[in-house]
Structures are given as structure tokens and as C-alpha cells.
Image: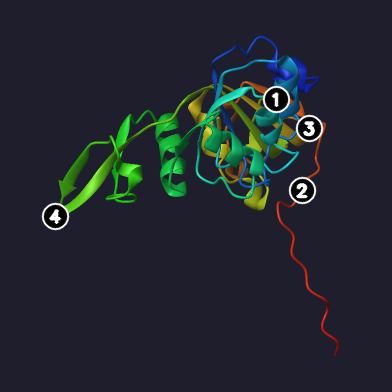
Amino acid sequence: MSKVFASPAAALDGLLFDGMTIMSGGFGLSGNPESLIPAIRAAGVKDLVVISNNAGADGFGLWMLLESRQVRKMISSYVGENKLFESQYLSGALELELNPQGTLAERIRAGGAGIPAFYVKTGVGTVVAEGKPVERFDGEDYIRETWLRADLSIIKAWRADPAGNLMFRKTARNFNPNMATAGKVTVAEVEEIVPEGTFDPDCIHTPGIYVDRVLLSTINEKRIEKLTTRPRETA
């Protein structure tokens, strides 16, 4: 049965509700679900908990949901240069659960693998450890971290077939494959939909069993978060 939907709004139909938790793929602006985020904004759902490495950049990505005040809490790793993220957090309008980046990735992977807790050394003796159990292994302290799971995962891939098998391209893979496994429902937007049987099974990055709905991206800007150039040196 084909999992392909005609538009971002159609792919999200019946999945959104106030207070839900959403995982959103991407690293900086690479691999962001550029088409699905505006559709969530248009749906008007609020009090969202969003799990993502960061919250987009000014005017783009998850910034759109912050600007419309639909996000109650971010579980993320990098505030970066997102001035809106910073101002909402400092004013108390936005809750923030800040994670070391590797810990965030492992919490998501654990959620998809059914592992409710694990131990890491990162953050011992810092604010990251506050309120968390600490245990000693081989004479070293480790923090107990817990899995992350979501009501909905929205991800961006390069190619998909109608069964939902996915391939990612280069660094745009980032958090997307792990998030695909950790959502109760996963919706993937892709740049290209190919016929079934196109993929060599060994080349599939995310099997279709983890993907519930697929749509062709309507936005593929692939912005660069911060671009720095220098004049070309003369010979």
C-alpha cells in the first residue's frame, strides 16, 4: 500500500493536537523538514514540546513556530544565533531543556530502540546533571539520562519509494534517521519519490517500517545558516 500523500497538510491530517510532542529533524538548516513546519504553523496547534537539535534561524525552520508562539518547550542542544529563541527563553516565555549534543542524539536513539535509560559522563558536575541520578562505574561518576520519544516525528530525506523506504544525502542525514524510529507516527518529506524496487536493499538508510507517511517536498531552499566568504587570492 502506498504511503504517499499529496501535500504537507494532507500528510499531517488527523495527527496534530495541542500539547503534543514533535521531533523535528535537521542540524542547523541542513535536513530540515522545510515543507512540514509551515503546515504545522498553519494548523494553529499550540503548547507544543519540540525536540530538535536547534530551532532554525531567523525567519526560517522552527523559528516560524517560535514566532507564532506555538512552542511551549524546546528540548535541544544549540541555541546558536537564533535571537528569537534567546529572547523568549530569557523572558520566561519558552521552556528549555538543554542537552549536550551527543546526549541528545543518544536519548533519541534510545527512544527508538526501546531503552528507557542509560548512563553518560558528559555533564557530570555541571548544570546538566542537576536533578538527575548519578552513579559510579569503575571509579567514575556517570549521569543517568532517559530516552526521548514523540507523538510525531517530522523528517527530511533525499529519496523515498511508495513503501516509505528512505535514503538520505550526506550531512542532511544528521538526526533524521534516529527521529524516524522514535515517533509514534513518522512523516517524511523527500526531494524525490521513486518506484518500488528502485532501491538496493543494502542502500536503504531508514526502512519503511518506521515511516507512516511520505510526501514530496514543496520547499527545498537548503539555506546556509551562516555563510562566510573571502576574496579569491590572485595568482
- Badge 1 vs badge 3, beta-carbon distance below 8 Å: no
Q: Residue at x 44, y 48 (%)?
A: 102
Using a 10 Å C-alpha cutoff, classify the residue at mark 4 as few (fewer than 14 neighbours), some (14 to 19) or many (20 or more).
few
Mark with earlier residue (4, 3)? 4
Q: CA distance from mark 2 to mark 4?
A: 46 Å
Q: CA distance from mark 1 to mark 2?
A: 21 Å
Q: Residue at x 70, y 25 (%)?
A: 68
The amino acid on which the numbered mark 3 sits, given as a three-letter code, is Ser
Q: CA distance from mark 1 to mark 3?
A: 22 Å
Q: In the structure shown, which secondary structural element does the residue marked by tag 1 occupy?
A: loop
Reading the image, the residue beneath label 3 is: 217
Q: Work out which residue is located at the far left of the displayed protein and give it.
A: 139
- Quadrant of the rendered structure where residue 60 is? top right
Left or right: where does residue 172 sit relative to residue 134? right
In this view, the residue in front, 226 or 127, is 127
Using a 10 Å C-alpha cutoff, classify the residue at mark 1 as few (fewer than 14 neighbours), some (14 to 19) or many (20 or more).
few
Q: Residue at x 16, y 49 (%)?
A: 137
Counting from the top left corner in percent of width and height, residue 226 is at 71, 56
Reading the image, the residue beneath label 2 is: 223
User: Foreground mark, 1 or 2?
Assistant: 1
In this view, the residue in front, 199 or 224, is 224
Q: Any mark on residue 68, and which?
A: 1
Counting from the top left corner in percent of width and height, residue 41 is at 72, 22
- Quadrant of the rendered structure where residue 217 is? top right
Q: In the structure shown, which secondary structural element does the residue marked by tag 2 occupy?
A: loop
User: Foreground mark, 3 or 2?
Assistant: 2
Reading the image, the residue beneath label 4 is: 139
Residue 169 in view: yes
The amino acid on which the numbered mark 4 sits, given as a three-letter code, is Gly
Counting from the top left corner in percent of width and height, residue 26 is at 62, 41
The amino acid on which the numbered mark 1 sits, given as a three-letter code, is Ser
